[in-house]
Amino acid sequence: MQNPASSVLIVDDDAAMRQMLLSLLRERGLPAAEAASADLALEKLRESEFGAVLSDVKMPGRSGIDLVGEVRRLRPETPVILMTAFGSIDAAVEAMRAGAYDYVTKPFEPESVLMTIERALERRALEEENRRLRRAVDRTASFGELIGQSPAMREIFALIRRVAHGRSSVLITGESGTGKELVARTLHYHGARAEKPFIPINCTAIPEGLLESELFGHVRGAFTGAHSAKRGLFEKANGGTLFLDEIGDLGLALQGKLLRALQDQEIRPVGATEAVKVDVRIVAATNKDLAAEIAAGRFREDLYYRLAVIPIHVPPLRERPEDIPALVDGFVRKHAGGARRVVTQAALDRLAQRPWRGNARELENAIERALALSDAAEIGAAELPLGGAGGEDPADDAEALLRRAGEERLSLRELDERYIERILRLTGGNKVRAAAILGIDRKTLYRRAERRARGEGEDPVSG
């Protein structure tokens, strides 16, 4: 049989009924076979695969109800539709309890039977596709740019596959460094919008006064310095995906304008009198607890529900240490410059024991640094510069700093400044990583650097 997934086995002791159904299905373009009894049907099912079984209930020997139980044991993925001349509620209940997909009553309308069969075939095809995707995911520890083989990551892979082709808004939550933007990119490039733009914007990196113009654009003369019209990111992402990173830091005024854009699928450039229609899928991300932000009045509840139509949570690395070997392998291949480098099991065991407050981003930094500092083909536990260039752990360094603070009678402000300086040095001046380790919002660190740059204090690092 050429296409088992779309073929139907008709089981009925009435030859005229079998021929009528065979003709009906073949006119619809569905391949079909027939059997005059449940026993003959089981023989055919042992020899061949069928997309669905359509069986009468009352037949000599085994009944259609009996056949359902046998099919469930022999071909559990094959749906069975039962035909009954009685149409009683009891017969329908018995059929469904036995495990039938559905039932139809005689006499029936041909179109009604065809629709029931086609629904069963569609469900069978969907279940088979889901099994195929699960098998594909089981064979690999990566999906697009995402890497992981923990149950949590496999669930994320499966969810992305299910929703990638839709247009519903997605909200990705998780700590800094967990790979939220990678989730957004994978979602975009495995969906129907893959050929259209993927436009990311960090809502923290742009001053709020400029962010409205950045998102929605502006017309010439809209404000001082607007010497020409500018298309906003919504228009640039038209047909594609707009990724709003750190959405939890968006001001309330802009939250309202974003909500209107989502509701109306149109935007109004700053200074414009007419709205512009856009077709943009919104994917947002945040490391904040938006429920707490809503309770505190800093985030609009109605916007949250617009964004979180499909929520995806990326758990921290410390909750999925089984992903570390695959991540390490990916980072080694990324940073080894084509050379064959491996990380020993002892080193992997040591990596698995760390809390990774900066998550996968911190792990990548450690692997890149280990490769840079060692020429050995094998990277062992001794070659891992965890925490800093000298192998210090930020937590250990904090304890030493506290001891010195007590000895030197430092004020809280002096202690605060020294500790931040130390963490910034340990992270090579990476404020994002430093903020994650310190447990503060990255904007706080940026503001501190800006105050120092204005002469209100000295920035511990440049850039």
Image (tube, grey):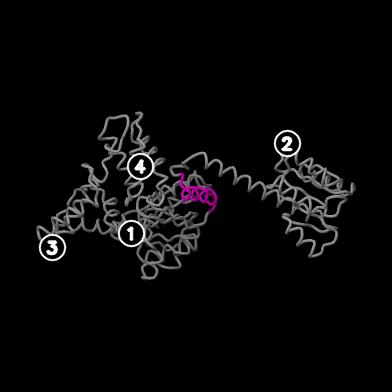
Q: Which residues are magenta?
A: 149-166
Q: Amino acid at mark 4?
A: Asp
Residue 349, which numbered label?
4
Asked if residue 109 is among those painted magenta in the image, a careful observer would answer no
Tell me, yes or no, if residue 452 can be seen here. Answer: no
Q: Which mark is residue 411?
A: 3
Residues packed near mark 1 inside 10 Å, few (<14), some (14 to 19) or many (20 plus): few
Pointer 1: what residue? 221
> Residue 10, how many percent across, how many down?
81, 46
Dot placed on the residue nearer the N-terminal end, 2 or 1: 2
Query: Mark 3 near mark 2, Cβ–Cβ under 8 Å?
Result: no
Q: Which residue is mark 2?
A: 2
Quadrant location, the N terminus: top right
Camera-side mark, 2 or 1: 2
Contact (Cβ within 8 Å) of mark 2 with mark 1: no
Q: Amino acid at mark 1?
A: Gly
User: In terms of depth relative to the viewer, which is nearer, 9 or 47?
Assistant: 47
Compute the Cα span from label 2 to label 1: 67 Å
Q: Compared to 203, does 135 lie above or below?
A: above
Marks 2/4 in contact by CB < 8 Å: the verdict is no
Q: Which kind of residue does numbered mark 2 sit on? A: Gln
